[in-house]
Image (spheres, grey):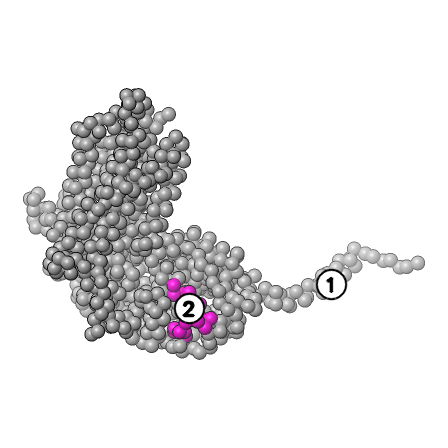
Amino acid sequence: MDQIIVQILNGLDKGSAYALIALGLTLIFGTLGVVNFAHGALFMMGAFCAVVTSKILSSSHKVVDETRTDFLGNPLEVDVFYMQDWFGETAGAAIMDWAVPLAILVSIPVMILIGFIMERGLIKHFYKRPHADQILVTFGLAIVMGEVIKYYFGANPIQTPAPEALSGRVDFGVWLGYGPNAIVYPMWRLVYFFFSASIIAAVFAFLQFTTFGMVVRAGMADRETVGLLGIDIDKRFTFMFGLAAAVAGIAGVMYAPIVSPAYTMGMDWLVLSFVVVVVGGMGSLPGAVLAGFVLGIIESFASMPGVVNLLPGINQIIIYVVAIAILLIRPRGLMGRKGVMED
Amino acid sequence: MSNNNVTRRGVLKSGTVAGAGLAIPTIFTASSVAAYTNEPGAGSVKFGFNVPQTGPYAEEGLDELRAQELAVEHLNGMGDGGMLNTFSSKVLDGTGILGREVKYVTGDTQTKSDAARASARSMIEKDGAIMITGGSSSGVAVAVQALCQEAGVIFMAGLTHSNDTTGKDKKANGFRHFFNSYMTGAALAPVLAAQYGTDRKAYHLTADYNWGYTTEEAIRASTEAMGWETVNSVKTPLTQTDFSSYVAPVLNSGADVLVLNHYGGNMINSLTSAVQFGLREAQANGQNFEIVVPLYSRLMARGAGENVKGIFGSTNWHWSLQDEGSQAFVRSFGTKYGFPPSQAAHTTYVQTLLYADAVTRAGSFAPCAVAEALEDYEFDGLGNGKTLYRGDDHQCFKDVLVVKGKENPESEFDLLEVVEVTPVDQVMYDPAHPQMGGAEATLGECNNGA
């Protein structure tokens, strides 16, 4: 039973990342009608916002230590951190330690800007082109973004730890009446789950309870009529692209301590996120979130040692098997609407 | 009137004799045209450096490429000469190889067997590479080695640690300087037993490909021989990044040691997950829970950061070694690139020099002559002490380094410390060892190609 609870927690954790990415994909598809294969790359860019913020906050100058030598036998140059120079040792160390949460503040404007540049500079030219063209151009863009990151940051994953205070474990089992250490779960993963849930709730609230959101929803339902009412829906949709990029970016920032950022992570998440969107139902925001959590939990259970040893490789195909099954029973996905991608 | 008795039999006889007569010069002088694949002209000779420049092992691949370029510089008499100055063989004098300038072409294996074969084939067929070296994955090395065997060129394997490369899948045209899974097990197990005791229960997470299988097999065999028990082993996809689902069940599995048969990015991520789930501070079976990483590299250790501290593993070579050869190589590489070389860089540099040396000693680029010069060749001064290129399986035998993550690193490169240099005798094995494919596994015939 304890293992089942751990896998549910793992699934919720993974599912919340799927849900955030799928939410952004659905927003872009629902508003602009664009199939954005570069959305996983935006998630990766977010994770690298955390890396860059961490590097900036840990920037240092060299001081020669004559008593020690480097690998070539020259006097060793020791790093002295600017943060500790400026704010003292304790405060400076604390700022560097909290680099990942601070990176959220950096990532929001950066990702909105990247989103604007992507939409205005490239994707808007493909609105009236077939979906296949959109896929090709956004997929190419994703490859370019990955290679740029590899050029500057190398190919190996880069360790980006969570703040010390949030790096510990929570004895989850004690809360549920189990003995000590029966169900131990990393604190940052719980933080990630609650953070994702808050972001998802905020996006829904924005769309549901603001005038801007109402117009966007109306535009998603009937773009032409909203345009005839004299509303510049294109401008709002461009903003939604920026918002979707920011959501993917924040998801990436917060995920950086869970899986060390690497240039390949965009592609790793992209295909699965599209499966999530299709299973949830093209254009359905609640469907994307629901499918994200469902598939995350199923994938976690399929990775349990007992299951993998019984059915080797099942963990690698389970999502696709479930997707096929769901689409056979409900061809429009879990919460798909009639008429979307059916013309 | 002339006697014109032309018969069918006569024509055939004459034709056969004439044909044989015309063919004789080419049969006996074929070697002067193309005795073997990509026989070089008088001016230069071309090497093919086939390394992963993209994919999960790209960091190692790019370091291999740097070292290979450095080796070419040294062979052509540029730079400080590096390990040419410390190599026990003195036939290389910095004037190229057999009077020819060394040139090279590069290819990207993408850490994929099919891409690696395509890249190697292109370098052999289009660029005229006489020798292929590189590779940072055993799956890739085995695939490219087989291709080189068919094509009739020498394959000097780079970073490949699976037993299969010089075991089950060994080839007469393939040679490996890097150590292997069996050697890791033989060197590491006694150190683990001394550190953690003989009453231990191990749980293996294993990368789901060639190298993962042989490493798990070797570590299991060596640790079980010391009294350890293996409670479970789970295969993990090579593309996996989040290992939480695999790591979470470990603590309640009855195990008190987790063995991560992972390399590169896989290892960085699986170790990160293990640390997140508190395995390093955990207690199991009344003992401290321990993690072991059989194959270490400094590049991986840098990626894993703080998490590697105190964790045991093995490595083929480390820049902190104090022998003359290692020092010369570190000086040469560090001066050129600004950081110390990795074990991947070291092994490909050494392989390039060893090939050049064998050609020079053989007096020929013909693959079979080079292979003969390498077989049972003993050398020193290349960073691993006295080393034997065993003729039976084309595997190098040398001391093995057992290392652990350094507790108090002094610099960003100072991440591993050597805790034991395991003597070569302890890691030696019979060429027909079951882990190496048994008696059925043979090198086959050397192929000169062309």
Q: Residues within 10 Å of mark 1 (few under 14, many from 20)?
A: few
Q: Nearer the viewer, residue B407 or B159?
A: B407
Q: Amino acid at mark 2?
A: Ala
> On screen, A148 above or below A291?
below
Q: Secondary structure at mark 1?
A: helix
Residue at figure coordinates x 30%, y 60% from the top left:
B215
Residue behind mark 2:
B71
Q: Nearer the viewer, residue B64 or B270?
A: B64
Residue B373 seen in render: no
Residue drawn at x 21%, y 73% as measured from the top left: A66
Which of B301 and A72 lies nearest the eye of the viewer? Answer: A72
Quarter holding the N terminus of chain B is: bottom right
**Same subunit: marks 1 and 2:** yes
Horizontal and vertical percent position of residue B236: 28, 50
* Quadrant in the picture for residue A110: top left
Q: Which residues are magenta?
A: B66-84
Residue A192 point in image, percent of width and height: 17, 44
Tell me if I can see residue B370 in this picture: yes
Residue shown at 37% from the left, 76% from the top: B381
Q: Which mark is residue B17?
A: 1
Q: CA distance from mark 1 to mark 2?
A: 52 Å
Density class for disc 2 (Cα within 10 Å; few <14, some 14-19, many ≥20) is many
Quadrant that contains the C terminus of chain B: bottom right
The residue tagged with tag 2: helix, strand or loop? helix
Does residue B232 sit above or below B153 in this rendering? above
